[in-house]
Image (tube, coloured by chain):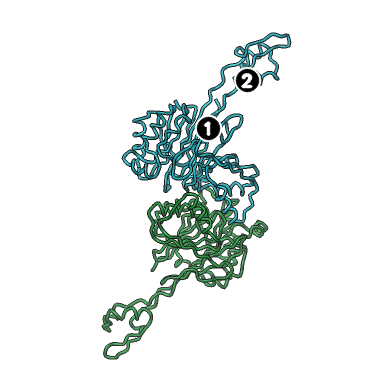
Chain colours: A green, B cyan
Amino acid sequence: MTKFSVLILGNASAAPTLTRNHTSQLININEQYYLMDCGEGTQLKLREHKIKLQRINHIFISHLHGDHYLGLIGLIQTMHLMGRATDLTIYCPSNIKEIVDVHLKASESQLKYTIIYKMVNSKDSEVVFEDNKVIVSSIPLKHKIPCSGYLFTEKPKPRRINPKAIQEYKVPKHCINRLKIGEDYTSLEGETVKNTKLTMDSLPSFSYAFCSDTKYFEKIVPIINGVDLLYHEATFIEEHADRAKKTLHSTAKQAAEIALKSKAKKLIIGHFSNRYPDLNVLLNEAKSVFKNTELAVQGNEFEVSNSQ
Amino acid sequence: MTKFSVLILGNASAAPTLTRNHTSQLININEQYYLMDCGEGTQLKLREHKIKLQRINHIFISHLHGDHYLGLIGLIQTMHLMGRATDLTIYCPSNIKEIVDVHLKASESQLKYTIIYKMVNSKDSEVVFEDNKVIVSSIPLKHKIPCSGYLFTEKPKPRRINPKAIQEYKVPKHCINRLKIGEDYTSLEGETVKNTKLTMDSLPSFSYAFCSDTKYFEKIVPIINGVDLLYHEATFIEEHADRAKKTLHSTAKQAAEIALKSKAKKLIIGHFSNRYPDLNVLLNEAKSVFKNTELAVQGNEFEVSNSQ
């Protein structure tokens, strides 16, 4: 089974507390690291979890409210001090380069590595990153300023070789890769062996959707349809729905309704207002609509493949 | 005895660690708070020490290297979220307003309070703040970019009333304030009583000098002459003097030499390179030159009046 996990580095909205840092998550897909948002203090949270900073090559910022990106400049500078040479790509629906540049100018720093900025479309879903294992698409959200979620979808995995059958039919090594993509095998003698005789089904592919600050916004439902693990902000409970409406945030119930409508396998909620010392009020509200909900507790790691 | 203390909120140079945050100190003079530098995560350190953020009205930034100010934007935003209405004054030898403004623009924030920016002269010492209790002057330092230390000097305190003598000579209440500034008392009958019969000597006044990132720079010696408590950076030990020279930092020995030459009562050193897991190598080097040295250990509070 390949790794696909989400480590919660922070889950606070507004002011951080000693147990709830600002939003950040580390997504690990097959030991490739992707950082999702980067609130103040994220570099220390990464250190706490013994994550090697230099293994992060892609940072996705949902929007430019301070609680989602103020740790970025410090992280960029620490990567520089530690001798980074590898490119770093930053995805954001607003001009974050302007912010990074004003800091670098002030400190008269010349980074030893290159930052590539990718402007994300926050009005429509589009592919923002793709490699041979994963596709990342933006998820348009509705907040006070341009704001984007991100959907990580594993590509279909290769069919698994059946070593016993390979031996039996004497398939040469150089034909293996073709079997993995589903082709039949034809021997030098012209005999064709069906792929299904030589391989087993691929391992399933999984998906994770990160839906950052947003009001209740049904437009995202078809985009995240059938997602395995859905993170959706749940800043308030229904009792404070007026506050949610005014600040363009969601209640726990609304987050659960999005999970239900999009047929997500599992929901995790976060970005908790610090007016709730007991987070169970949020959890219970969400669970009353969508049973398979958990709190995005800081320090918890969620296995996307284990979302049933 | 009035309060005059320095609480160490961080002491790391370059990359922060789990036990050493970036530079910040809270100076408490008679329950007035002054924040000195504001590395990333300072707002959480303040929270850890149960310091009410809104009681900070003056923030002094030494220079615009990230490890000295990257916590400022988050602190400003948290003060705003918590409903601040009081002015906040920020002192800095460079244009920090440009940085704050680019963040506020990105988040489309309208602060509910006013920030007053005071540009500090980093070439010569000059008074940057004064009230009825304290004078704060800049200390020109020599670093890669404009950098200023700050000298806090308590003003002479009022003479202390001798309650027994006041009663004996039947001094009316409205004459008390004049006694405090040293005047004699003349009764309605024309009898003059010497001030020294009615009052006791003032409590002593103390001073604290914060000397942030700098190479060894003797020009500061007359400015901080006779200071009670001196904080001086000591990033390296003499073994790495070449590194100190190249980066315009000081060694522990150099910090101690400045303490010795300026006849400081006590020295605290900080801004430690994280190449030294055991900080005693820095402490011992400084002590070999200036005995009354301590490490600016994170979480320690130093009483300036107790510097002998």
Mark 2 — on which chain does it sit?
Answer: B
* Rendered view: A216 above or below B83: below
Q: Determine whether label 1 and label 2 are within 8 Å by CB.
A: no
10 Å crowding of disc 2: few (<14), some (14-19), many (20+)? many
Mark 1 — on which chain does it sit?
Answer: B
- Residue position for label 2: B180
What residue is shown at x 26% (from left), y 83% (from top)? A170
Q: Amino acid at mark 1?
A: Phe
Number of marks in the rendered image = 2
What residue is shown at x 55% (from left), y 68% (from top)? A121
> Along the horizontal axis of the image, is B20 left or right of A220?
left
SS at mark 1?
Answer: strand
Residue B287 image position (x, y, % from top left)? 36, 31
Residue B106 image position (x, y, % from top left)? 58, 57
What residue is shown at x 44% (from left), y 40% (from top)? B142
* Rendered view: A128 above or below B33: below
Disc ID at residue B107? none
Viewer can see residue A108: yes
- Residue position for label 1: B152
10 Å crowding of disc 1: few (<14), some (14-19), many (20+)? many
Instruction: Compare residues A104 and A271 and report the one nearer the observer.
Output: A104
Residue B53 image position (x, y, % from top left)? 57, 42
Judged from this view, the residue extending furthest toward the right is B188
Instruction: Compare residues A23 and B184 and report the one nearer the observer.
Output: B184
* Quadrant of the snapshot with the N terminus of chain A: bottom left
Instruction: Compare residues A214 and A228 and report the one nearer the observer.
Output: A214
Residue B264 image position (x, y, % from top left)? 44, 28
Q: CA distance from mark 1 to mark 2?
A: 23 Å
Give the mark nearest the N terminus, 1 or 2. 1
> Along the horizontal axis of the image, is A139 left or right of B17?
right
Q: Amino acid at mark 2?
A: Lys
SS at mark 2?
Answer: helix
